[in-house]
Image (cartoon, rainbow, N blue to C red):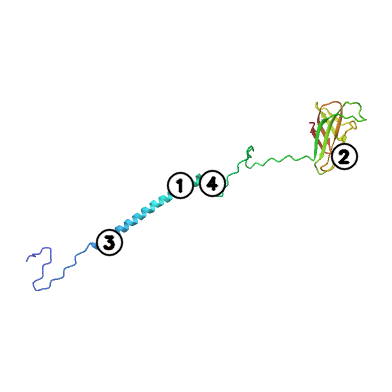
Amino acid sequence: MSNPYPGQTPPPPYGYPVPPQPPKKNNVGKIIGIGCGGLIGLSLLLAACGAIIGGSDAFKKGAEDGAKSVSMPAASAPGVSAPAAAPPGSAPVASGTPAPKPAAKQDVELTATPAEFNASVLAQGDDYTSVQVTVVNNGDKEVSVNILYFEVTAADGTRKTAELGAAGDQIDTVTLARGEKVTGAVTVKGKITAKTVYFKNGLLGKSYSTSVK
């Protein structure tokens, strides 16, 4: 006997209870699950994109800050002072080059200037040339001054010894302590243009010289 209900379960014979029908499948849960999963995935995707965008902005900001710190002049950096400007009119001093030291004073300072001849009673005429000389003791040792310890060089190179007793204002024979000085005339025979005066500290002492100015 053919089934009059194709694709369906035939009804039971008359008088038998009707068997329960199998529950129909409901796709609502599956749709909801798929929807929730999609929303979660979309949220994760948006979060990742936001992190990438935010990271890019942070990286860009960090690069800009780095460029600013590199281009910042030394004077504006915290804790760094700008080099002091040299005062107007002063010559620049090279870095690392020490300033020149002032010249040290000699232990005996000698100066000489032209002077008129002041004849003494021992002078033989007026054929003499006098130079006024000052001797200063800057050292710790005593300095012995005597007219016999002087010589005068003329402009032509001639060197003459001093004449004893020829000038009335002859330099004194003294011993100078530190800081003391003496001034007097050193006179030589003949009319010359005095150029240089030489002085020796004692017969065997150190020699000094100065130009006649």
Label 1 is placed on what type of residue? Glu
Q: Residue at x 48, y 46 (%)?
A: 68
Where residue 94 appears, x then y in whole percent? 63, 40
Q: Nearer the viewer, residue 153 or 133?
A: 133
Quadrant hosting residue 173:
top right
Q: Secondary structure at mark 3?
A: helix
Of the image marks 2 and 4, the number of the one nearer the N terminus: 4
Where residue 102 appears, x then y in whole percent? 72, 40
Q: Secondary structure at mark 4?
A: helix
Q: Nearer the viewer, mark 3 or mark 2?
A: 2
Q: Quadrant of the N terminus?
A: bottom left
Quadrant hosting residue 202:
top right
Q: Mark 3 = which residue? A: 33
Q: Exactly how many numbered labels are in the figure?
A: 4
Where residue 42 appears, x then y in whole percent? 32, 56
Q: Which mark is residue 76?
A: 4
- Kindly report the distance in space between the C-alpha atoms of the residues bearing marks 3 and 4: 61 Å
Q: Quadrant of the C terminus?
A: top right
Q: Nearer the viewer, residue 39 or 181?
A: 181
How busy is the neighbourhood of tag 2: few (under 14 within 10 Å), some, or many (20 plus)?
Answer: few
- Kindly report the distance in space between the C-alpha atoms of the residues bearing marks 1 and 3: 46 Å
In the image, farthest residue toward the front: 88
Q: Which mark is residue 174?
A: 2
Left or right of 127? Residue 40 is left
Labelled pair 3, 4 in contact (Cβ < 8 Å): no
Q: Which mark is residue 64?
A: 1
Labelled pair 4, 1 in contact (Cβ < 8 Å): no
Label 2 is placed on what type of residue? Val
- Kindly report the distance in space between the C-alpha atoms of the residues bearing marks 2 and 1: 84 Å
How busy is the neighbourhood of tag 3: few (under 14 within 10 Å), some, or many (20 plus)?
Answer: few
